[in-house]
Amino acid sequence: MEHVHLAAEEDDLYSGYNDYNPTFDSEELDNDAGFQQAVRTSHGRRPPMTAKFPGTAIGGRALGTSFGSRMPMASSMGRPMTGAVQDGAARPMTAVRAAGYSSAMTRGSTFDPLGQSKGPAPPLEGKSEDTPDEKVKILEKKVNDLIEESCLAHGHGDLQLVSLPLAKEAGRKERALVRQREQSGNADHINLDLTYSVLFNLATQYANNDMYAEALNTYQVIVKNKMFSNAGRLKVNMANIHFKQKNYPKAIKLYRMALDQISNSHKEMRIKIMQNIGVVFIRMGQYSDAITSFEHIMSECPNIKTGFNLILCYYAIGDRERMKKAFQKLICVPLGIDEEDKYIPPNVSTSILHPHYKALAEKFIMTSAKLIAPAIEATFAAGFDWCVDMVKSSQYVELANDLEINKAITYLRQRDFNQAVETLKTFEKKDSRVKSAAATNLSFLYFLEKDYDQADRYADLAMTADRYNPAALINKGNTVFVKKDYEKAAEFYKEALRNDSSCTEALYNLGLTYKRLGRLEESLDCFLKLHAILRNSAQVMWQLASLFEMLEDPHQAIEWLMQLITVTPTDPQVLAKLGELYDSEGDKSQAFQYYQESFRYFPSNIDVIEWLGAYYIDTQFCEKAIQYFERATLIQPTQVKWQLMVASCYRRSGNYQKALETYKDIHRKFPENVECLRFLVRLCTDMGMKEVQDYATKLKKVEKMKEIREQRVKSAREGSARGTRREGSASSASRLILCLFSDSGHSSHGTSAKGERLSAKMRALPGSNEPYEASSQRDIDASYVDPLGAPMERPKTAAKKRNEEDEFADEELGDDLLPE
């Protein structure tokens, strides 16, 4: 077969392919020079490009084989494999020049279709920012960035500091953009969407920062601009602002204007606006108008919130039958799908994706039932029963048991514990969840009634029904706690925390348990954790202060109490504790301030009254201490010591007549009080009154009676037979002296001389069983102890000088009779 040669214009010749396919001999490939040359030139690289055969030259240099022309190869049969150029002239490469080949390539050059051998491409020519169009684009981008940053700042809660300033800056940039367009003659190309976005964002930020006047003005600018489409919807936002300002008539007017501008095709938006109108009518007390709005919504597009509001309106007007109908409509409302859920596949349950819908519906149904149950029937029990029957026939069957438990709780609020217990006992045969809840409540009730055995029994029942019920575990721990088995109680509290780590009751009780066990550091750790959860809990702060006091860290205790009074500034117990701590630290002025505040809020605390009275006595203001001791007298009228302190305050302040009257009044109330009689004897003696003999005689009789009583007590306690009359009289006299000095609060060093004289007198008594009768006033022990300490200096009468030389010395106050 002959070779076919194709001719091209301009002498661009291409070697044609013939139809002959030669057969190669694979055994002689090693000796085939053409094949071996092809292998050497094609292994791992392309062959060098040339326009001539080997041995020719371009520009004086030799080139390799040409890619454009094939080198003749001899086959094993001796035939040429391709067509050959008749002459050795170079062939042009015009046909493949677009692919990067060139006939002008020199020796050693490589294939470079992208022209990378020429070096990097020159940089792109930058756009000039001086042109008006570029300036407008840059400014528009800045405005959009500011709007976006303002919205993000609002989402992060930075309202006043970031979001509002950014919104204002975006407004300024947008106005500058409009002026620039007008100056460049492009006023017709103003970006209305950008202007709307700037104004809307600015109005929103004003409203978020409670700048309602500025927000309304900005919304008004948008609404009045006819170039903004659908701007009338923003009247809803304006109505919301008027609602916050409690300008309800204006809010209703704007809601209705917005409703008129929204077509019927936007049914959901119209329903929401009508719901807002109904809420405004409720705030205005126009329940009939609100009912009209809510009834229309329930007929067109029923939802849970509207049904609940409708029940509230019927309850407000007291319409029982319509309350029942509204409740039936409420429990029949299907769980709707929100706008966001329209893309959810129909085979996926929305109740699984949105469980909070059902939880919200159950909350509204439970609240409605508790609200209307006492109103729809003669008794609230009958009303609850009707609600339970309705719920059982609806899609919320599981709420029936919860309503029954709420019925028991209502009995508790009415202090009808028996009915509450009977109601809860009906759940003992129900399913485990309800049984556990009912048993938990029963355990709590019995615990309050201090029936700890029943409380323990029902706590066990609740745990058996649901071991993971933290409330049941806490009740069980409480029953063990009152039995003082603190280690076991701590285990139950820990188990409750393992089941529910957020159970604050278990953590609090665990802290108390550790405190009882003396493990103060572990208790402190519990209450510190609890404080991190309940930041403003007064009980937790009080326990922390108490623990630091027990750990002998009064400064930390004071710090926690100072935090506590920021939460409960009028708690008298906290203020008194602060006063006590400051007093222990030696800061009397701060202690007095807090004790005084505690007394102002609760003037019946005996400890506070006693401290304040003692404080004024220490500062030599006895007349100011009188009011506190008189208050103590009113609180504890059977305690004679407060009245004695009042009388002593009068005496110390120099008002002897008032002191004498007070002592006489005490003697009428407490005729057997030895101290009062001693004071009366002393005062009458000092003032030279004739009544001194009467009081001395009474003092003698009281002392004799006291001696006899003590003798009987002593005899009964010892259980021994009476000794001789002489020995009995002597021992009685000795006991009398000891008793008198003990009751008077004498110190041994202050009364030793007088005691010796009285002892000598008692030893000189005859050994008979007859009561001793003094021959004169001086033989009677009328010594006394001033409850307030050493008296003030006053003029001494002759009788007083005479008595001071004997046993009637004016003693100092013993420390055991001073108020602590």
Image: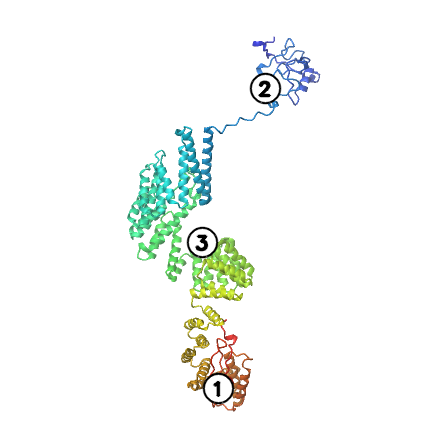
Q: Position of residue 771 (x, y in %)?
A: 48, 89
| CA–CA distance in space, label 3 to label 2 | 84 Å
Q: Residue at x 54, y 81 (%)?
A: 751
Q: Is residue 527 above or below residue 155?
A: below
Residue 780's disc number: 1
Left or right side of 480 for 58: right
- Depth check, mark 3 against mark 2: the one in front is 2
Give the residue type that dot 1 points to.
Ile
The answer to whether one can see residue 268 in this image is no
SS category of the residue bearing label 2: loop
Q: Residue at x 56, y 9 (%)?
A: 9
Q: Which sits in the foreground, 61 or 435?
A: 61
Q: Position of residue 524 (x, y in %)?
A: 54, 59
Mark 3 surroundings within 10 Å by alpha-carbon count, few (fewer than 14), some (14 through 19), many (20 or more): some
Regarding mark 1 in the picture, which secondary structure is present there?
loop
Front disc: 1 or 3: 1
Q: Report helix, strand or loop for mark 3.
A: helix
Say left or right for 811 vs 405.
Answer: right
Which comes before the other along the chain, label 1 or label 3?
3
For disc 2, the marked residue is 100
- Separation of marks 1 and 2 at Cα, in angstroms: 143 Å
Report how far apart the C-alphas of labels 1 and 3 lie in the structure.
82 Å
Image location (x, y in percent) of residue 41: 67, 19
Residue on which disc 3 sits: 432
Check contact, mark 1 vs mark 2: CB within 8 A: no
Q: Quadrant of the N terminus?
A: top right
